Amino acid sequence: MTIRWKPVVTGVVLAGLVGGVGYAVQQKLAPPAATAQPGGPRPGPGGARNSVVAVQAGTVAKEDVPIWFDGIGTVQAFNTVTVRARVDGELQRVSLQEGQLVKAGDLLATIDSRPLQAQLAQAQAKKAQDEAQLANARRDLDRNMNLKEFASRQTVDTQRALVAQYEAQIRADEAAIEAVQVQLNYTTITAPISGRIGLRNVDQGNVVRASDQNGIATITQIQPIAVIFTLPEKQLQAVLAAQAQGPVTVEAQDREGRRVLDTGSLAVVDNLIDTGTGTIRLKAQMPNDPQKLWPGQFVNVRLLSTVRRGATTVPATVVQRGPQGTYAYVIKDDLTVEQRPIKVARQEENKAIIDEGLTPGERVVVDGQYRLQPGSKVRIVEPIASSTPQTAAPQTPASATTPAPQEERRHNRQQREGRQPS
């Protein structure tokens, strides 16, 4: 039988070409082998990392720590007075200015006093009339008394009653004069307290009445000023104990809690606990000099309940929490770490007070605990100092450095054809 070699040879050649193309494609798509960088980390046996862990360390301290209670409060004016007219009349003059700081007794406004001056003159005239009649009645009484037995007892008694009547009338006239004088004094409106004037409600030229509810303006006393805040009821006994020992310091901070606006003292603890919220209301007095607090302002409040003397303290980041409770990594003399359970009494911002588990002077891990295990070898490093961020260099557009996909494919095709790229 005759074998046709031409088709067989053709098939073998085609199979070889396909295999070669596939191998070339595989080599092209395969990622480049990783090469070790000079001075870089080398993988250990089984791919394990270096057993020495870089950590930041701190020392257990012994110091006096103030214990603060935090709350949220509202600033209120120490006193608020609505200035109202106490007599009816035309508002002839308004001396106050909106937003002005006034002192007690400063002139604020003047009401037309002419009607009351007329009433005063009338009351004074009535008193003069009654005094004249009293003088005449007293002379008649003297004449009757001089007649002795020639004057009847009835005439003398009647004259005495008339004198007493005129004396009582004069006392009534004096009271009427004093009443008008008081009303006349009300036509001059002065500041009852020192403080800041708010917006004016009535303009000059209007008729004001004693029955008006809005008043002319409002004065709020802001030096000193009050802060009303709340604390949980569980802290009430500590607050009362601190108050029994002397003045209790209270700080008012801004909403972010970063800046102290003013420092004062606790003035009043409310006499009941809010059963709905389980909180107690307190009032603090602030000098507010300079005026950084304003009525109606929301502030963060801190109350100094006590100072814990000789407390064992560590940075707050030292305290770790696990299934068995709180613990800390203690650095031993051989630079290995020990996982030690601790008892945290209180944590104040970036500081924790430790009751049990640590001794002043011991070194503890401040940062880097997530890579540690009991017995791990550590290397103590200093914290990285924060530096000013450098201005980033302007980025070059990708189209200027990296060829577009179409240009890249054309460039490769020209290289395969042996042509010079254009």
Image: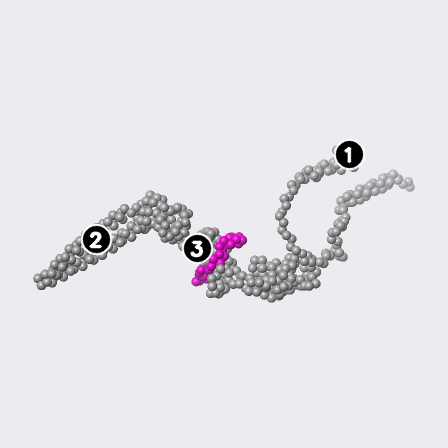
Q: Which residue is mark 2?
A: 127
Q: Residue 32 appears at what percent x and percent y?
A: 76, 46
The residues tagged by marks 3 and 2 sit, at their Cα atoms, a distance apart of 49 Å
**Residue at image x 74%, y 36%?**
410
Q: Main secondary structure of the magenta part?
A: strand
The disc label shown at residue 420, or none: 1
Magenta residues, as a range? 250-274
Kind of residue sitting beneath label 3: Pro
Quadrant including the C terminus: top right
Q: Residue 41 appears at what percent x and percent y?
A: 74, 53
Pick whichever of labels 1 and 2 is earlier in the sequence: 2
**Residue at image x 59%, y 63%?**
62
Q: Around disc 1, counting alpha carbons within 10 Å, would you say few (fewer than 14), some (14 to 19), or many (20 or more)?
A: few
In the orientation shown, which residue stands out farthest toward the right?
1
Kind of residue sitting beneath label 1: Gln
Kind of residue sitting beneath label 2: Lys
Quadrant including the N terminus: top right
**Is any part of residue 370 visible from this angle?**
no
In this rendered view, identify the residue nearer to me: 369 or 324.
369
